[in-house]
Amino acid sequence: MSKYHIKTLEEYFQVYRQSVRDPELFWEEVAEEHFIWRKRWDKVLDWDFDKPAVEWFPGARLNITENCLDRHLTIRRNQTAIIFEPNDPSEQAQHISYVELYRKVCQMANVLTEMGISKGDRVCVYLPMIPELAITLLACARIGAIHSVVFAGFSAAALAARINDAECKLVVTSDGSFRGGKTIDLKGIVDEAMKDCPTVDHVLVAQRTHTKVNMQDGRDHWLQPLLDNAYKDCAAEQMDAEDPLFILYTSGSTGKPKGMVHTTAGYMVYAAYTFKNVFQYREGDIYWCTADIGWITGHSYIVYGPLLNGATTVMYEGVPTYPDWGRFWHVVEKHKVNQFYTAPTAIRALAKENLDYVNRYDLSSLKILGTVGEPINEEAWHWYDENIGKKKCPIVDTWWQTETGGILISPIPFTTPTIPTFATLPLPGIQPLLMDEQGKEVIGNPADGRLCIKFPWPSMARTIWGDHKRYRETYFSTFPGNYFTGDGALRDEVGFYRITGRVDDVIIVSGHNLGTGPIEDAINEHPAVAESAVVGFPHDIKGNALYGYIILKETGEDRNQDNVRKEINDLIAARIGPIAKLEKIQFTRGLPKTRSGKIMRRILRKIAHGQSDQLGDTSTLLNPEVVQEIIDHAI
Ligand code: WTA
């Protein structure tokens, strides 16, 4: 039996049991079966969740790109590695073979070296979903530079904050990006950010939209001419197992975004293993994940996981709605996609439209459907199952996080029974548990509580860039000895997990994690604002939307409230990005506070959810009288 590829439920249980009984032996066998190493590990695992410190395969030496590229050059040299589907359906798709990808990555790696980048340097990648994005990631990995991708929907201020936090030396961007009918001036955003980024020496600019851009002498360089002159071979830097591979920022409840650090060997093993099993990828399949590479899903399941398995992975530049609501299904038919992986928010949006947009296309190539990013509601699950999968394709509801690097809880298709809204069972090597609010493990089934993981897995983030203390406090202090996910979950009679959502102040809007703290900081910058509190409330398509309760300063001036609302949202868009805009803004004279002055978000959340009748006892508040006022004016 192959440890690397599970095919039956019996095998799953057998492998799972082994993986818990002897995790080191289990991961050692997986690592031996599938990968090439330059030097073998001295040990499989070293760990201590108190420090916390985790090392997988210490002593091993490798380069992840030799596993993504070089290894395939003998057996699948001319097989397509990446299918690039442009935003505009009339533009031809590109098929990039493994050998072509290898050469492009080497050329890019040589360009980076020429620009003074070497092992350990940080490179910020601010690119749309064009092939250069995947190529840049791999090129960084080739020479041991650490990539830090910033989603190209973030504002200049958010980009600058991330560049400065990681002290990036170089930025890779493009002149512009196409998103549906819009052209976005990415280079302009980078220029704006550069006013405040002293560590950046060079900006490489890929050409995509042919928009006229400003090029600063000495700093900015067009990418293509440099690539054209670069060698098509580049020796792979030999990395230590625990050398950082990339940094990826995720929102925290408070403070600045957290730069999650992922390292080389463990991430590689886990991304590859989970891709193979969760998508049951078979030689020749065409796999498509609709995420953006700006998020972890794109890192692990558009780039690394698929390429480590010699897969053909689709990269789609545009949005689900362009030129119309049928675009996803058009692409599925066009490229004969076998595995399709998307987010519940996209499913909900598409499910609202006429079924004609689906039925006009031949979806018979589909074998497996996936979802990720937030809980999927039953209605959306059934719509996906019936109309897209035609009830023949198992749906893998995959639960994981930027911090976990790879999928932790998910059905294995054709193996684990699927149940709507359930992520079902932990993958091999993953040991989840539920905790009550007092920090005691909830034993037995059914159960609910806060979801923790008690044993390390290879692709867990090792630290927060530059702030290990925050890493410990955020993930390992709430339930000492365990990794705390920030999510709530329930476990049914047979032990299947259902993720119920965040239990902290992170709100997931259209699959994007947003921390309330940074949004409130942006709102409070408005000169008319005295104080604010942001909570989430259920939204049909986005899953959650943002509700802001805002106290305005008494300036004596009679300000037009609609103008202030707009200015506040503009400010949020500028500081964070348009995705963090408030859907509802209620001006209020007070916010409910505890006697120690903490805002009682629980009450605000209930009111935003339309559940003002379930507030419980509010008499212990410092200012119970404001509650009624807020209820009376709720939107
Ligand atoms: C949520 C995305 C329910 C969860 C890979 C988690 C989910 C956060 C699911 C991480 C799912 C992700 N069911 N909730 N299948 N997948 N989540 O870091 O709250 O962008 O903590 O990683 O998304 O979001 P992130």
Image (cartoon, rainbow, N blue to C red):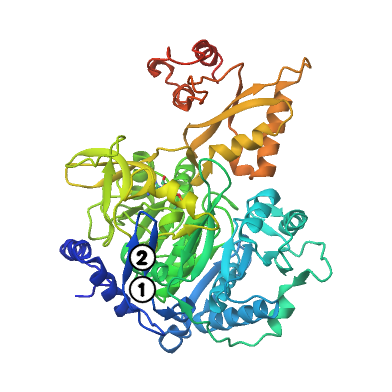
Q: Quadrant of the C terminus?
A: top right
Residue 68 rendering spot, x and y as whole percentages: 46, 77
Residue 192 rendering spot, x and y as whole percentages: 76, 53
Instruction: State which quadrant residue 404 falls in.
Output: bottom left
Question: Does the rendering let one see residue 93?
Answer: no
State how far apart marks 1 and 2 are (Cα). 9 Å
Which label belongs to residue 443?
A: none
Q: Secondary structure at mark 2?
A: loop
Tell me if mark 1 has few (under 14), some (14-19) or many (20+) residues whose alpha carbon lies within 10 angstroms of its own: many
1 and 2 marks in contact (CB < 8 Å):
yes
Q: Residue at x 68, y 54 (%)?
A: 160
Circle 1: residue type: Phe
Whether label 2 lies within 8 Å of ligand 1 gets the answer no
Residue 353 rendering spot, x and y as whole percentages: 49, 42
Tell me if mark 2 has few (under 14), some (14-19) or many (20+) residues whose alpha carbon lies within 10 angstroms of its own: many
Q: Secondary structure at mark 1?
A: loop
| Residue found farthest to the right | 217
Circle 2: residue type: Pro
| Lateral position of residue 208 relative to residue 421, left or right | right
Judge depth for marks 1 and 2 and give the one in front. Answer: 1
Q: Residue at x 70, y 66 (%)?
A: 208
Q: Quadrant of the N terminus?
A: bottom left
Instruction: Identify the residue under disc 2.
Output: 458
Instruction: Identify the residue under disc 1.
Output: 57
Residue 303 rendering spot, x and y as whole percentages: 49, 68
Instruction: State which quadrant residue 14 falls in.
Output: bottom left
